[in-house]
Amino acid sequence: MPQEKFVIRGGKNLSGTIRVKGAKNNALKVLAASLLSKELWTITRVPFVEDVLRTLELLRALGVEVSDTLSGGDIVTLRAKNIISTTLDTEVSKRIRASMVLTGPLLARMGEVVFPHPGGCVIGERPIDIFLKGYEALGASVELSKGFYHLRAKNGLRGSSIFFPVVSVTATETLMMAAVLARGTTMLKNAAMEPEVAALADFLNACGARISGHGTPHIAIEGVSELGGGTFQVIPDRIEAGSFALMAGATRSRLTVADCNPAHLDALISLLQDTGVEVEKTESSLTVDATGRKNLKARSIITHEYPGFVTDLQAPAAVFLTQLEGESRVFETIFEGRLNWTQELVRMGARITVADPHRIFVNGPAQLRGREITSPDIRAGMALIIAGLIAEGETTVHNIYQIDRGYEKIEERLRGIGADIQRVNA
Ligand code: EPZ
């Protein structure tokens, strides 16, 4: 794959409407869930991003019949009639953390799954202990041999009560999927309440699952013997929507963020409004107006599970904070490595003091200057694009593979609102 980079010339006025794609972190789980059913599933509004393509590759290798229109449309059809393997492809699994969500449905359907420790972003230690304990509670045996996990439940999974010691989005989703085909009832306690979890449960129910309590910390799943077919539209990507809203604030622009669900963005909207940015909502759009606002007030953020301030918006929010008057604090409570990227922002002129791996102080406003920078992960990559848009001069962002993992054709869409950003071969 050729190495590519983004070259951004900052300081341009942004305006107009930008449309939000389907949520990567909802699409990945629904695609994985197709392993639970022998019938045809049609998924629409699927974003054309690297992590989705890699997940489809994993599913095809397991025998799922997949067809997609992703290069020109957004529809994927899947049919897992005959599963031909219970081993996840090593190379792909090591690249994307979301490969882990395939293990639940595969174990439930086939009574066996083999996989390596999953990869993903460089945002901190990403253990899988909660998944493994959950599988054991559902009656599976877990063996680690030569770097591969072997999970077996030859007589099928059985319902159980599982308490999550920390709230985990993918562990909630994965164990919920596994429990759909288990015998008896499973209770998930201290479950994640993210909209992506609730949307997945609603769709599984539409296909014949019996899940209740999703969207709350207590999810009950009554096992069923099989799931039928169905059609599902992926929910709007709240991280993309929030990033565009923060982009409007940071660049002092007026942008309409269309095709989103503002009801999923309360914490972000509250932050923007507290600083002095104007936000207007409809059912499916946000108009964020920061034009002419010179003295936006410093505000602090603490990342938290939904409905708190989502960790995936911490990085773009931190760039916004560099443009506020006074000292803001960022307390990243979910991942211990997720503030390291701010060193790149400091190289661009941000005034940031690191208190400890979880906390920084941001002093603003700071004039950022164009630099050669490297994107360490998906969300920090988007943050560095926003930094490039407000910086004086030219910014080059390297390692944009990370950005392509989560945002579809981002440069084309940003050019549509006036940004000067080009993708060039490195
Ligand atoms: C999901 O990751 C998202 N990924 C992440 O988005 C997101 O940042 C995160 O949730 C938090 O919202 C997907 O949905 C594919 P967690 P996930 O398990 O589920 C600890 C992006 O940019 N933990 O909710 O992997 C873990 O270390 C990605 O799109 C354990 O200790 O995150 C963390 O501190 C990055 N043991 C906490 O739980 C486990 O077995 C919450 O992480 C599992 C997790």
Image (cartoon, helix red, strand yellow):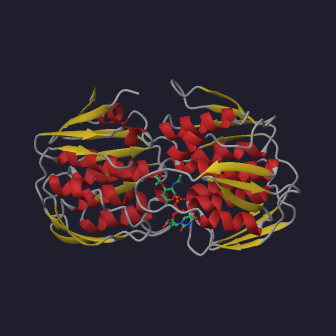
How far across and how far down the image is residue 342, in percent? Answer: 25, 58
Q: Is residue 230 above or below residue 335?
A: above
- The answer to whether residue 153 is visible is yes
Nearer the observer, 294 or 5? 5
How far across and how far down the image is residue 308, in percent? Answer: 45, 69
Q: Identify the residue shown where x is 78% and y is 53%.
A: 108
- The answer to whether residue 215 is visible is no
Q: Identify the residue shown where x is 21% and y is 49%.
A: 251
- The reply, left or right, for residue 254 in relation to residue 180 is left
- The reply, left or right, for residue 45 in relation to residue 268 is right
- The reply, left or right, for residue 54 in relation to residue 273 is right
Q: Identify the residue shown where x is 58% and y is 44%.
A: 27
Q: Identify the residue shown where x is 70% and y is 34%.
A: 78
- The reply, left or right, for residue 98 in relation to residue 114 is left
Nearer the observer, 420 or 403? 403
How far across and how far down the image is residue 74, in percent? Answer: 56, 32
Quarter of image, res 303? bottom left
**Which quarter of the rendering shows the C terminus?**
top left
Q: Is residue 180 above or below residue 80?
A: below
